[in-house]
Image: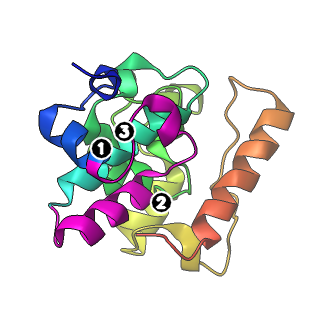
Amino acid sequence: MGELRSIPNVGKATERDLKEMGYTNILSLKGKTGEELYAEECALHGDVDRCQLYLYRAVSYFVNAKNPDPKKCSWWYFKDEFVFPSPCGAVCVSCPQFPAACGGCRKTKGNAPWLQYVGAKTCPVYDCCVNGKKQKDCGGCESLPCEKFTKDPTISDEENAENLKRMLQNLRAPSRL
């Protein structure tokens, strides 16, 4: 078994594909995104099942994260619904509560763990965006950000400000779902 096989989700076939693409060890994968690896494999083999993209996203996370969370290394946590912004712009796979405490807004239908602190049954952003306006996210809303974007009471004002900034950037990015 080669070094590449020590990466979660990398079996014999993926190891072979990575080697065909010129990746011989973990260090050679540093800095690569899942999208880049998937595009390289598609260029090599033609149409490749989209699940391979999810696998490569997980590989990229494992290789590039400073301290990858073993609970987040499964390829299915890197499907589009967890990688692309949720209705508020948060990226589920980047959240410390995902997947143990929260399965993501699309799975829980806006029933986030932090709701216990604000006394709501559904996230106000999710409720407005998905249930009310029938949108996938708030990226096109004229009122972005609005008062429905509540502060997380478990973190500092500075952390809340950084989170909101990152969420807005995610919603305004052209690569949204």
* Residue located at (69% from left, 52% from top): 166
* Residue located at (38% from left, 48% from top): 82
Mark 3 to mark 1 CA distance (whole Å): 17 Å
Give the foreground label among 2 and 1: 1
Q: Is residue 104 visible?
A: no
Q: Which mark is residue 58?
A: 3
Name the amino acid type tagged 2. Answer: Pro
Q: SS of the residue at dot 2? A: loop
Q: Is residue 100 magenta?
A: no
Please give the range of residues in magenta: 20-48
Q: Is residue 15 left or right of residue 168?
A: left
* Residue located at (33% from left, 59% from top): 38
Q: Mark 1 sits on what residue?
A: 19
Q: Earlier in the sequence, mark 2 or mark 3?
A: 3
Give the foreground label among 2 and 3: 3
Q: SS of the residue at dot 1? A: helix
Which quarter of the image is occupied by the N terminus?
Answer: top left
Answer few, some or many: residues within 10 Å of disc 3's Cα (few below 14, many 20 plus, some between 14 and 19). Answer: many
Name the amino acid type tagged 3. Answer: Ala
Q: Earlier in the sequence, mark 3 or mark 1?
A: 1
Q: Which mark is residue 87?
A: 2
Q: Is residue 44 magenta?
A: yes
Q: Position of residue 43 (x, y in %)?
A: 29, 71
Image quarter for residue 121?
top left
* Residue located at (61% from left, 25% from top): 66
Name the amino acid type tagged 1. Answer: Lys
Q: Which mark is residue 161?
A: none
Q: Earlier in the sequence, mark 2 or mark 1?
A: 1
Q: Position of residue 50 (x, y in %)?
A: 20, 60
Answer few, some or many: residues within 10 Å of disc 2's Cα (few below 14, many 20 plus, some between 14 and 19). Answer: many
Q: Is residue 128 left or right of residue 2?
A: right
